[in-house]
Image (spheres, helix red, strand yellow):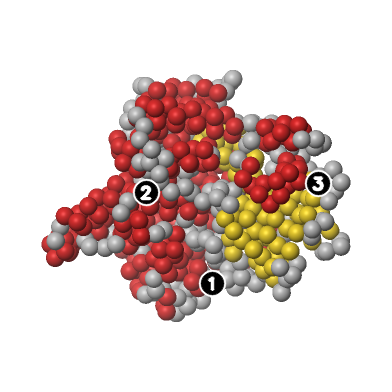
Amino acid sequence: MNDAMRHRGPDDAGTYLDRATGTALGARRLSIIDVEGGHQPVSNEDGTIWAVLNGELYNHPELQSWLRRHGHVLRSRTDTEVLVHLYEELGEDLAHALEGMFAFALWDERRASLLVARDRFGEKPLFYAEHATDEVIFASELSALLASGVVPDGLSAEAVDLFFIHGYVPGPGTIFGSARQLPPGHRLRWQRGAGVRIDAYWLPPETAPVEQPFPYLVAETRQLLDRSVRSRMISDVPLGVFLSGGVDSSLIAALAAAASGAPIKTFTVGYDVGDVNETVPARAMAEQLGAQHHELVLTLDDAADRATDVLTAVDQPLADPAFTALAAVAELARQEVTVVIGGEGADELFAGYPRYQWLERAVRLDHALPERAAAAASTLIRRAAGEHVRGRRLSTVIGREDTLSRHLSWVTAERLPMRHRCYGERLVELSGGDAALRQLSHLVDGSVDVDPAAGLMRLDQRLWLPDDVLMKADRAGMLVSLEIRTPYLHREIAEFAASVAPRVHMQNGGKALLRGVLAELVPSRNRRPKTAFRVPVGEWLRGSLGDVLREQLTSGPAFQDGWFDRIQTGRLLAEHAAGTRDRSDILWPLLSFSLWLDRRSRSL
């Protein structure tokens, strides 16, 4: 299992075995804090409590000082050692004291009990499976879980269905029917005879607006972000910043530059096709900050090889097109640094997605327009829009749908109705199911129709953020042994952001508080519309990646084994290649799954 995760920690490896119970812990290490003295697993003074950690505890210096004042003897500067001593003081509630990105496991020999926990937003992954009648197996990646030899590797048809809809496998399920994800902000406890118990120690806070003057809110945002960025710059190895030129990354880069005693290193990726290139604004921002800037141009010819390598290397399929680009810029950064700081989480906490505003307007229209008039207007707009994405989305705003149905349609690029066309015999019975909508309903309450922006921001924090955005960042970094840190996901920042009314966040096109801080730090920066981290996927699929998908249609197990329909997918690809319709949103999940399944089938 350790060997299967060597890419996550190429610098060191260690194992522990409690021979009395047959319990084992293992760890791979990417050495960042206390490079020489941070070997894992780590024990307390008498060797009765053992721990392994994936990630970083940013408040470990403060915790180390507190533990020493309470009489503990620490033998290293590593953050992992904090866990065993905190457990002695706080017991199973120690996760409340931690600030960072982490998945850890702790074994108490005296009580013969296991404690496993995952950070609040799911920056670090944690998978587990219950085996036989009284065993639990866990790991940071599914590949390691399967390497145990006791976890079945059969695919879940329900998970494949949800993957096609979302473009990722939403937790707590996985692509394999026998394995589960530990949800973010949760802990798992196990004792022989008692089985597995899972509960939440933290959830994204519900919005509880406290009226404050806007300048005060900007000042508080700046103070919290500055403290968070500084904590994430603690490292015994070289560190850099991902920079796209947008609000999120520019703000992080500006704060990092102000906190650094030397010019920071920044990294960005661009393209030789399409109209989503961000190299020019990133270069301009880096110049303003006096950064040592590095760029990579991902060419159309390179895209096929890179996408194939990346999409097949992950432990479960991911259809976010930006994954390929993020992996490419991570590889560029790894040539210079071991740690980078990124901007993940800003949109979900500070209302950066335009759909929050549009879906809130939809609720107001529901109350203003008669039902028949709304239905007629929606039908007319949809017919006129044809394949135009914005027009089709406007039709959902005017039409009479509940907020969750509208949200699901928008975030999944309307793939739900395409299941009837794309699914093969293994999935056809699921093509009319509503599992995706039921899952969303379980994560929110009825208040989402009263305050859509607040409800959907919190929903994104619990689903889209951990299972797509943070999975993408974790795997892109770990594939090249690069640690990606996210200052926006500090607990205090999350709780502060939830205390601000969504209408305040959504001013000035969204992320109003972040824009306010950036205007103070870089007054001359030009305003840019939000583009997210986009890639020219349409052009890629009309080029070499279209040829890759054609090969999969001929011999790939995704189509040969009945998961998806070869003929219908071929027709969609032909439409896209001819330029008559943009089918990127449908073809990319099919390509991602097919490549992933093909590589997995070849390795069995």
User: Whole-percent x and y of residue 371?
Assistant: 16, 64
Q: Amino acid at mark 2?
A: Ala
Disc marking residue 43: 3
Residue drawn at (63%, 42%), measured in percent from left and top?
A: 98
| In the image, residue 141 above or below residue 94 | below
Mark 3, residues whose alpha carbon is within 10 Å: few (<14), some, or many (≥20)? many
Spatial distance from mark 3 to mark 1, Cα to Cα?
Answer: 38 Å
Q: Are marks 1 and 2 in contact (CB under 8 Å)?
A: no
Q: Callout 3, which amino acid?
A: Ser
Q: Secondary structure at mark 3?
A: strand
The circle drawn on residue 156 is 1
Tell me the crowding category of disc 1: few under 14, some 14 to 19, or many 20 or more residues within 10 angstroms, Cα based: some
Secondary structure, mark 1, is loop
- SS class, disc 2: helix
Residue occupying the point 46% across, 38% down: 496
Q: Is residue 380 left or right of residue 490?
A: left
Q: Is residue 43 above or below residue 60?
A: below
Q: Is residue 195 above or below residue 252?
A: below
Identify the disc placed on residue 454: 2
Whole-number angstrom distance, CA of label 1 to CA of label 2? 33 Å
